[in-house]
Amino acid sequence: MFFLSIINWASLVFLGFAFWLYYTYPAAKDIASESSPKSIYDFTVKDIHGNDVPLSNYRGKVLLVVNVASKCGLTSSNYKELNILYEKYKDQGFEILAFPCNQFGLQEPGTNEEIEEGVCTRLKAEFPIFDKVEVNGKNTAPLYKFLKSEKGGLFVDAIKWNFTKFLVSKEGKVVERYAPTTSPLAIEKDVEYLLAK
């Protein structure tokens, strides 16, 4: 009985101390939320030439963020349709941000210079191409950690293949995620909707 009484008193003292900490110092959640990104604008990425690009440069625009590859079975159709979307909506505040990734079937093996040459010459891309990144695993780019945390995939959050697409609102919030096999033109209505908001 005496032993249980000591445990009860110890528990009360511990709870009192916990309440004191809670009201004296900011909650751990508040500290974490202050440092955790709230929008895509909180990130700086590297362009294909290695220059820093704050994504806040795109504030107020609708963005489509895509992990791309030059030697994938989906490459030709995706680049063709991405180019159509970009040409149609770029003057209305739409941007496509393409991030080369070699994690799926080693289908983006080149250097940044080789990627840029192939994308601009062969695939005629005019939208921004960024530094090659990893989108899964321990070396996942911080931007992709954020994108996946905002819009998880079916069954798992991991990116499943090349040309996974994330649609981002003018406020920098991730509003939709599309599978690699989703045609860029199939999401045109979603782009139009966000541009009109």
Image (cartoon, rainbow, N blue to C red):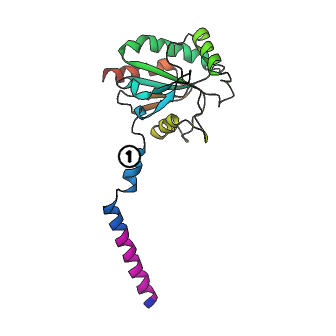
Estimate the x, y position of residue 135 in percent, counting from the top left: 57, 34
Viewer-closest of 178 and 167: 167
Q: Is residue 197 above or below residue 89?
A: below
Q: Which residue is drawn at 42% across and 11% down?
A: 88
Per the picture, the main secondary structure of the magenta-coloured stretch is helix
Amino acid tagged 1: Glu
- Name the image quarter holding residue 92: top left
**Left or right for 69, reference 189:** right
Estimate the x, y position of residue 14 in percent, counting from the top left: 40, 73
Estimate the x, y position of residue 157 in percent, counting from the top left: 54, 40
Magenta residues span 3-17
- Name the image quarter holding residue 108: top right
Q: Which residue is drawn at 50% across and 34% down?
A: 143
Q: Residue at x 42, y 33 (%)?
A: 40
**Left or right for 73, reference 1:** right
Residue 19 lies within the magenta run: no
Viewer-closest of 74 and 49: 49
**Left or right for 192, reference 44:** left
**Placement of the C terminus among the 4 image quadrants:** top left
Residue labelled with disc 1: 34
Q: How crowded is mark 1: few (under 14 residues within 10 Å), some or many (20 or more)?
A: few
